[in-house]
Image (cartoon, rainbow, N blue to C red):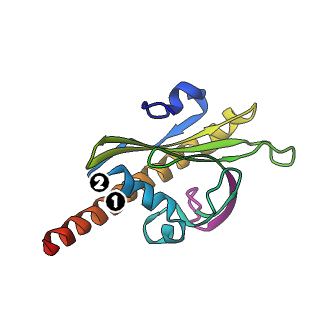
């Protein structure tokens, strides 16, 4: 593992890569990591992925309920598989290529520490394989909106938790 954060833009074809706006969060990377890995609580803060279950072991399924951002607002089931787990740095899962559903993709959630009390978060989805460009045309805009909403909600949640903990430390002193 290097000190440089994982860079999806250097790995994937940018023509088929959706990225959230990077958000700077006034909370340590450890707090953001804690929130991302506390899947039973996703429904309390995540506007896109309102339910998630996984052991987060490499290869384990991530079973999710996603809000349909195409306008219906219904919940859509989704299962992907953990493919990267670097505490406080990178959490990724992938939709594997399958002849029955030939639309592989990889979701990377990147955390970059900016100091002991700040970090940056970015979420990407790389649409892979020969159908990636078609998936990008059909889904890219709403996936970006969903990821931007998630990044903003994560920022709000992490900053609130961090502020609460700092307040508790101040009261204990």
Q: Quadrant of the C terminus?
A: bottom left
Please state the horizontal and vertical placement of residue 113, each as a whole percent of the image: 34, 42
Residue pointed to by mark 1: 158
Element under disc 2: loop
Please state the horizontal and vertical placement of residue 158, each as a whole percent of the image: 34, 59
Element under disc 1: helix
Q: Is residue 72 magenta?
A: yes
Which residues fall within the magenta stretch? 67-81
Spot the residue most to the front.
173
In the rendered structure, which disc, 1 or 2, sits on the residue that comes first in sequence?
2
Query: In the drawing, does residue 5 fall left or right of residue 169?
Result: right
Residue pointed to by mark 2: 27
Measured along the vertical axis of the image, is residue 141 above or below residue 74? above
- The residue depicted at 25 percent of the width and 50 percent of the height is 117
Q: Which mark is residue 35?
A: none
Query: In the drawing, does residue 57 fall left or right of residue 100?
Result: left
Q: Give the number of callouts.
A: 2
Q: Nearer the viewer, residue 167 or 97?
A: 167
Q: Is residue 77 magenta?
A: yes
Measured along the vertical axis of the image, is residue 11 above or below residue 154? above
Q: Nearer the viewer, residue 105 or 59?
A: 59
């Amino acid at each position: 593992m290097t000190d440089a954060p994982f860079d999806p833009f250097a790995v994937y074809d940018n023509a088929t890569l959706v990225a959230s706006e990077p958000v700077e969060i006034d909370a340590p990377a450890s707090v953001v990591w804690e929130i991302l890995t506390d899947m039973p609580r996703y429904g309390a803060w995540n506007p896109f992925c309102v339910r998630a279950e996984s052991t987060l072991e490499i290869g384990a399924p991530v079973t999710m309920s996603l809000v349909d951002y195409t306008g219906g607002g219904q919940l859509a089931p989704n299962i992907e598989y953990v493919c990267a787990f670097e505490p406080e740095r990178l959490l990724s899962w992938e939709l594997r290529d399958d002849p029955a559903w030939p639309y592989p993709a990889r979701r990377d959630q990147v955390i970059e520490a900016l100091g002991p009390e700040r970090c940056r978060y970015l979420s990407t989805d790389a649409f892979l394989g020969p159908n990636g460009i078609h998936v990008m045309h059909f889904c890219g805009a709403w996936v970006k909106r969903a990821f931007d909403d998630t990044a903003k909600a994560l920022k709000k949640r992490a900053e609130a938790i961090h502020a609460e903990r700092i307040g508790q430390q101040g009261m204990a002193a």
